Image: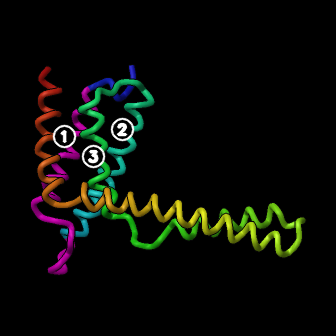
Amino acid sequence: MTITSTSTTEIVLLIGSIVAIVVGLLGRKNKDGSEFKTALRAISGIMGAIMILWAILMVVDGTWNLIMLLMVLVLGIGLLLPLLPKFNLGTILALLIALIAGAAVSGWGGWAVLVVFLIVFFVLWFVFKLIFGATRMAGAVLGSRWVLLVVGIFGIIVAVYSMTT
């Protein structure tokens, strides 16, 4: 018996849905300087991370059904991704990997190292920029207040229905 085969999955979905509804009603932006929104952002990020990890556990344990897995994933992404920092992590990763590739061919001579470094950097920079752009767009869509409100309500319906059957 695994942890995701009990009713804990429904409880995780229910808590995530409640957090999504609160975020949908109140929003995450701190316009008046109160600390309530900061706490809401922290709770939203933590619950989003927990839900994404829970979805991974459901798949690894083999205890998932499609609607429950989709609800947990959509709510997890919607709660977590809009909170990710705005700096470009793809550029940093591309630089590090290109540095390793340049060091790996250091015996080939100066021009070869420069060419390998630049080719690896620009290819990876483009790929990571595309991936992070798509991720940021998905976070913006799924993390909007109205989408979180609707998905949160639907998540409560799914969790309650799953607990009663």
Which residue appears at 16% of the width and 47% of the height?
151
Mark 3 Cα shell of 10 Å, populated few (<14), some (14-19), many (≥20): many
Q: Earlier in the sequence, mark 2 or mark 1?
A: 1
Q: Is residue 61 above or below residue 131?
A: above
Q: Earlier in the sequence, mark 2 or mark 3?
A: 2
- x, y percent for residue 140: 27, 62
Mark 1 Cα shell of 10 Å, populated few (<14), some (14-19), many (≥20): many
- x, y percent for residue 30: 20, 75
Distance from disc 2 to disc 3, alpha carbons, whole Å, reads 10 Å
Q: Which mark is residue 105?
A: none
Which amino acid type is marked by label 3?
Val
- Give the labeled residue for mark 1: 14
- Give the labeled residue for mark 2: 55
Check residue 11 for magenta coloring: yes
- Give the labeled residue for mark 3: 74
Q: Is residue 20 above or below residue 1?
A: below
Which amino acid type is marked by label 2?
Ala
Q: Is residue 66 above or below residue 106?
A: above
Can you tell which of label 1 and label 3 is closer to the viewer? 3
**Towards the viewer: 64 or 10:** 64
Check residue 51 for magenta coloring: no
Figure quadrant of the C terminus: top left
First to last magenta residue range? 7-35
Distance from disc 1 to disc 3, alpha carbons, whole Å, reads 13 Å
Can you tell which of label 2 and label 1 is closer to the viewer? 2
Which image quarter: residue 59?
Answer: top left
Q: Earlier in the sequence, mark 1 or mark 3?
A: 1
Question: Image check: 68 left or right of 89?
Answer: left
Distance from disc 2 to disc 1, alpha carbons, whole Å, reads 14 Å
